[in-house]
Amino acid sequence: MVKIAPSLLSADFTRLDREIESIKSCDLLHFDVMDGVFVPNISFGLPVLRAVRGVTALPLDVHLMITRPIRFVERFCELGADIVTFHVEADEPENIRGALLKIRALGKKAGLSVKPATPVSAVEPYADLLDNILIMAVEPGFGGQSFMTAALDKISAASALVSRLGTGCDVEVDGGVNRETARLCREAGATVLVAGSDVFRAPDRRAEIEFLRGQL
Ligand code: DX5
Ligand code: ZN
């Protein structure tokens, strides 16, 4: 079954422990880190990850929207990330490979993300090191944007790549996921759905997670 990863970016930051408790039926907690350089916004970082790690046993799915992620991946792993995914556009090939190796050396899962304008083929050179391919269905930087349907073909392409490799790598989609687009993403072969505003705005978050899974 598809895994659901609510994005904490849409939570009420003044009561994070209760917000996390309210979505505990999910599979992963998605943690968006923005540096104001790679994307035109700043979110939260290492101290907040440490605090979140202290109040939940859920796997932490860290999405780094930062330049030169190789500088920080080890610290995110040490503070409790289970999966660290960063952008293939964020550095030179040598450092992209180096960062993936650092994450894996610490026993964590490593992933690469592609922005809407970047083809899935950009991650192929690193396929041997990937546990996750993250397809952005919006321009990274903000929650609450509309799903770009062009992401569906990219999900299919990533899914085909993963089948070809036979490595069991996840295909994750992020941005504009709601009940309707979730269904399209599942049909296209996504294995992890990130949802921020859809889950946190829902009156019944547990039920919303089931809807996104296609179980209601
Ligand atoms: C956007 C972030 C997303 C965001 C998704 O840059 O990477 O994870 O929180 O929010 P929604 O689900 O509201 O589009
Ligand atoms: Zn994200």
Image (spheres, helix red, strand yellow):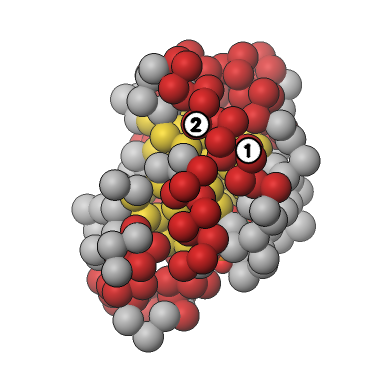
CB at disc 1 and ligand 1 closer than 8 Å: no
What amino acid does circle 1 point to? Answer: Lys
Residue 75 visible in this rendered orientation of the protein = no
Q: Residue at x 35, y 48 (%)?
A: 2
Q: Residue at x 64, y 60 (%)?
A: 147
Residue 130 appears left or right of 43: left
Residue 176 appears left or right of 19: right
Q: Which mark is residue 20?
A: none
As drawn, 180 above or below 85: below
Viewport quadrant of the C terminus: bottom left
Q: Residue at x 25, y 65 (%)?
A: 24
Residue that lies at the very extreme toward the bottom in this rendered image: 203
Residue 154 visible in this rendered orientation of the protein = yes
Residue 112 location (% of width, % of height): 56, 32
Tag 2, which secondary structure?
helix
Q: Which mark is residue 154?
A: 1
Q: Which mark is residue 159?
A: 2
Q: Which quadrant does ligand 1 occupy?
A: bottom right
As drawn, 79 above or below 176: above
Tag 1, which secondary structure?
helix
As drawn, 209 above or below 77: below
Question: Looking at this view, is 214 or 145 the one in front?
Answer: 214
Question: Looking at this view, is 79 or 107 the one in front?
Answer: 107
Q: Residues within 10 Å of mark 2 (few under 14, many from 20)?
A: many
Q: Residue at x 46, y 43 (%)?
A: 190
What amino acid does circle 2 point to? Answer: Ser
